[in-house]
Amino acid sequence: VQLQASGGGLVQAGASLKLSCVASGSTFRDYFVAWFRQAPGKEREFVALSAGSRGGWRTSYADSVKGRFTISRDNAKNMVVLQMNDLNPGDSAVYYCAADRRVIASSTRNPAAYDYWGQGTLVTVSS
């Protein structure tokens, strides 16, 4: 499966952005799809998960984004969307979508568990 992430940009604190991850080459509904982010000098960190049909369609979020970010799917478009509200400068990073058909529950927040990655989209939040 090939992933294409888009939607990043430069916004002010308190603004919203919507990131999209579109898949091609395979049916997306079976995949665990997660968003990760990586700020300069920091490790890649988990942001949100949409578990897909193999994971009971559950979602989960990093504590730092819970209540502000929402992950959702449009299976007809083979797309996962990350709606980000009330952004703050701490959210600035390159955001990556990742996917895999088989991810054990204890590893869903581990980047190493995902074989397929999008190219990343830059989000910059100014104060």
Image (cartoon, rainbow, N blue to C red):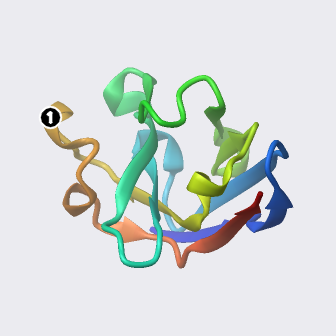
Residue 33 location (% of width, % of height): 44, 47
Question: From where the camera sits, is residue 78 visible?
Answer: yes
Residue positioned 64% across, 51% down in the render: 78
Task: Identify the residue under disc 1.
Answer: 106
Along the line of sight, which residue is nearer the eye, 115 or 119? 119
User: On the picture, is 76 further left or further right than 109?
Assistant: right
Residue 47 location (% of width, % of height): 46, 45
User: On the picture, is 45 further left or further right than 68?
Assistant: left
For the N terminus, give its image quadrant.
Answer: bottom left
Residue positioned 72% across, 49% down in the render: 77
Along the line of sight, which residue is nearer the eye, 104 or 30? 104
Residue positioned 70% across, 67% down in the render: 124
Residue 16 location (% of width, % of height): 82, 45
Q: Say which quarter of the image contains residue 44.
A: bottom left
Q: Say which quarter of the image contains residue 120.
A: bottom right
Q: Say which quarter of the image contains residue 126.
A: bottom right
Residue positioned 28% across, 66% down in the render: 115
